[in-house]
Amino acid sequence: MATKKIKLTSQTAWETQKDLNDNFSDLETRLDELDIPENTSDLTNDGDGTSPFATEDYVDSHGGLTDVNVVGNGNAVTNVEYDTDTKEITATKGETFQPASDNNLDTNSKTIVGGINEVNAVAKQANIAKSFASYSALITELNSASATAYKVGQSFYVQTQNVPDLWVMSIESSSSTYTYTTDSAFVTATAQSGGQQVGYYKLAQLETQKVDLTNYVEKTTTIAGVDLQDNITVAEMQNALSDSTHRFVTDTEKLTWNGKQDAIADISFTSSDAGWSAIDSDGFYTLTIVSTKKPFIVYNTSGEQVLAGLKYDGTNVYIITDTKFSGTVSVR
């Protein structure tokens, strides 16, 4: 509250001041004798301020009437006025401000204390994930929970194996009860793009549940007994996979084998085989023998080479001779 200062310039005024100090009981009488200025023009600047002096109208138009936050009860007052005659302060109760205990920053009239409390709560992970034994337990909880019990982004971990964990994607204005039937039905419901509402809360599956690991190899898998968790050397792989019918070979070995002549096989036949044809008009017989290899020489039973015609069509060998006989044909 400002103090009015009066500069006393006369001896009488100084004596009056001294009398006031000496005889306080005579204060009211002495005050009547003082010349109280009624206009700002009657005042003299004594060096502690600047002229012109502020008028009541000026004070009122520059914040003289201001809202005051009353500490402790969470209310505000407006139109605070000071009556110079009665020496009283009057005020009008205004709108309700956010109590310091309210940590919700969504409140229309926010306080620094409330804001700090919420920031502090977030910093301390007040919205940390919550665990439930099953979907059924989670649904029972959310169906009866208020709209302020949880926040958007809240995670719910379910202890049941092989079901997705969930998070709150939105909080709805009205509650909708969800009736639990099976885990499978709830998984399908929460997999929708819009999620599934339970009580006030729209739930969706956590992103980690959307990763398809079907084609990934489990760490416990082995190849022929070799653990995939360890680095597998070539030697270990060869030893694990090789047996009497399976071997690892080099490119050099394959080239060497491919460059070799095909193995020769002998196919025996007799003069009475059903494969012999009747003699043709040129006086020749033809013996047909099924073979996947080409013929290149014919022997009789004595091991002697027989002069005969040979043909091959990819499926059969044809021996053409003027006499039916027994022997072998070599193919490769």
Image (cartoon, rainbow, N blue to C red):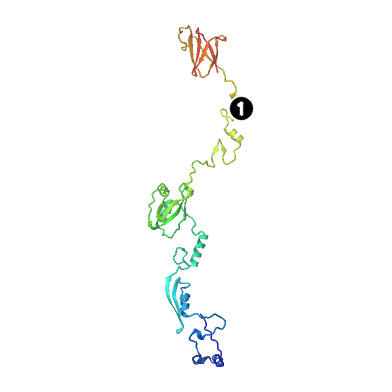
The quarter of the image holding the C terminus is top right
Residue 117: x percent and y percent? 50, 64
Residue 144: x percent and y percent? 40, 57
Q: Closest to the observer: 196 or 238?
A: 196
As drawn, 227 above or below 160: above
- Provide the secondary structure element on which disc 1 rests: helix
Q: Residue at x 51, y 14 (%)?
A: 311
Q: Closest to the observer: 86 or 289?
A: 86
Picture quarter containing residue 83? bottom left
Picture quarter containing residue 151? bottom left
Badge 1 is on which residue? 253
Residue 155: x percent and y percent? 47, 54
Q: Residue at x 50, y 10 (%)?
A: 320
As drawn, 278 above or below 99: above
Q: Residue at x 44, y 74 (%)?
A: 77
What's under tag 1, amino acid-wise? Glu
Label 1: how many Cα within 10 Å (few below 14, some 14–19, many 20+): few
As drawn, 131 above or below 64: above
As drawn, 64 above or below 298: below
Q: Is residue 137 visible?
A: no
Give the tally of numbered discs: 1
